[in-house]
Image (cartoon, grey):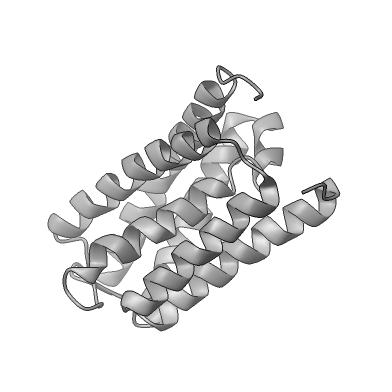
Amino acid sequence: MNIKPTILILVNFICMQLGWAICMLYQNFLAALISMGIFGLNIKVAALNLKHIKLIILIASFGFFHDFILAKAGFFHITGQGSIDILWLYSLWLLCVSSFNCSLKWLLHTTIWLQILMGALGGMLSYWAAFKLGAIQHLQPFEFTLMIHALDWSISFPMLFNLYHLLGNKLPNS
């Protein structure tokens, strides 16, 4: 598919936000499947090769295990239907990482400080919205949990974002 870069960025951003919103509003198997379908559409529109898809899966796996550990440590609880939490959470991470090389790629040409700020604000606001929409419950005091998310994302977002681009630059263009 030959799509103008600005349209591709817009489609990527809309796909990420739509998939996130569906998962936040409906914490169930169908929401996770729809989110995975949106991720697939995103890949198709961006015409990503298999090596880049594997890279997205790898980096999303880091993010997923990171959140999974935080949930198991008692920082938050996903209000979904038990075992569906895994697919639900992983689909969110696939959508997030698929934006690293498209709608969030502009961050690559900024300072690490802006990436840290975007991670802190974006991560904290994402968990705050998830809480307000009933997708997660905070098991610690609310303000403490938000500070933990801000601190956590100020470290993990720049790390995962730059790891994606570092490894991505080593991939052949085919």
Does residue 129 appear in the picture of this structure?
A: no
Does residue 162 appear in the picture of this structure?
A: yes
Question: Relative to the observer, which residue lies in front, 147 or 125?
Answer: 125
The quadrant of the rendering that contains the C terminus is top right
Q: Is residue 106 left or right of residue 37?
A: right
Name the residue located 60 percent from the left edge and 20 percent from the top edge: 169
Question: Relative to the observer, which residue lies in front, 72 or 56?
Answer: 56
Residue 16: percent from the left, percent from the top? 57, 61
Question: Relative to the observer, which residue lies in front, 70 or 34?
Answer: 34
Count of numbered badges drawn on the protein: 0
Q: Is residue 42 left or right of residue 39?
A: right
Residue 150: percent from the left, percent from the top? 41, 52
Residue 22: percent from the left, percent from the top? 48, 77
Name the residue located 46 percent from the left edge and 34 percent from the top edge: 55
Q: Is residue 133 left or right of residue 45?
A: left
Q: Residue furthest right?
A: 4
Name the residue located 29 percent from the left edge and 71 percent from the top edge: 142
Residue 155: percent from the left, percent from the top? 41, 38
Q: Is residue 45 left or right of residue 141?
A: right
Q: Residue furthest left?
A: 73
Q: Quadrant of residue 92?
A: bottom left
Name the residue located 36 percent from the left edge and 62 percent from the top edge: 146
Q: Is 145 situated above or below 96? A: below
Q: Is 69 situated above or below 166? A: below
